[in-house]
Image: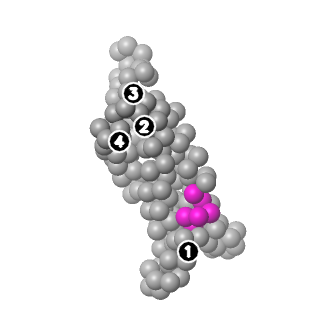
Amino acid sequence: MTDSTYTTAPGTKRSTPTKIAIALSVMAPVAAILTGVMTWANTGFGNAFLADWSVSFLKALFVLMPFALIVMGLLARVIEAALPKISPLGQNLVLGIIMAFVMQSLMAVITAGTTAGFGDTQIFADLWWNALVTSFPIGLAMALVMTTLIRPRLIAILRS
């Protein structure tokens, strides 16, 4: 998975706060959309929607998304080593599918926990499953776009 295709202008050096802002600007819409769909799947657009979605979004953005960037980098290396004969695009597609399932599952935990808590395991499991199944098609599409188009450019920006 060669990411050297995308480079920045010679001499361009970004500060750490700028790099964090760039990463957040990419991660925030993903977290907002997915937690929004999951919250809607579990509560509808009722009175509790905005409060539940806000909490889920903030947890996903500041806890789950940084974890996702680390896992994505490690998983990309594993896939590259395990599937060396597959093209970089094929490796990125495999990465996108795996990341979609992992991240959707974890975001569904956050959303179900925010919506109903963790006390009743049956209710929690039902809400988790509902959130996962409802949002998975959207999350899969977003993950494939992220791993094939956005990730290489983001890596180039963060390395500068």
Residue 73 shows in the view:
no
Disc number lying in front (4 or 1): 4
Image spot of residue 119 (x, y percent): 44, 85
The earlier-in-sequence mark between 3 and 4 is 3
The earlier-in-sequence mark between 2 and 4 is 4
- Callout 1 environment at 10 Å: few (<14), some (14 to 19), or many (20+)? many
Q: Is there a contact, CB below 8 Å, between mark 2 and mark 4?
A: yes
Image spot of residue 50 (x, y percent): 62, 66
- Callout 3 environment at 10 Å: few (<14), some (14 to 19), or many (20+)? few
Disc number lying in front (3 or 2): 2
Residue 127 shows which numbered tag? 1
Image spot of residue 92 (x, y percent): 45, 38
Left or right of residue 93, residue 66 in this image? left
* Residue marked by disc 2: 91
- SS type, badge 3: loop
- Based on the displayed image, in which of its 4 quarters is residue 45 positioned? bottom right
Q: What stretch is highlighted in magenta?
A: 131-136
Query: Marks 2/4: CA distance?
Result: 7 Å
Q: What residue type is labelled 2?
A: Gln
Residue 79 shows which numbered tag? 4
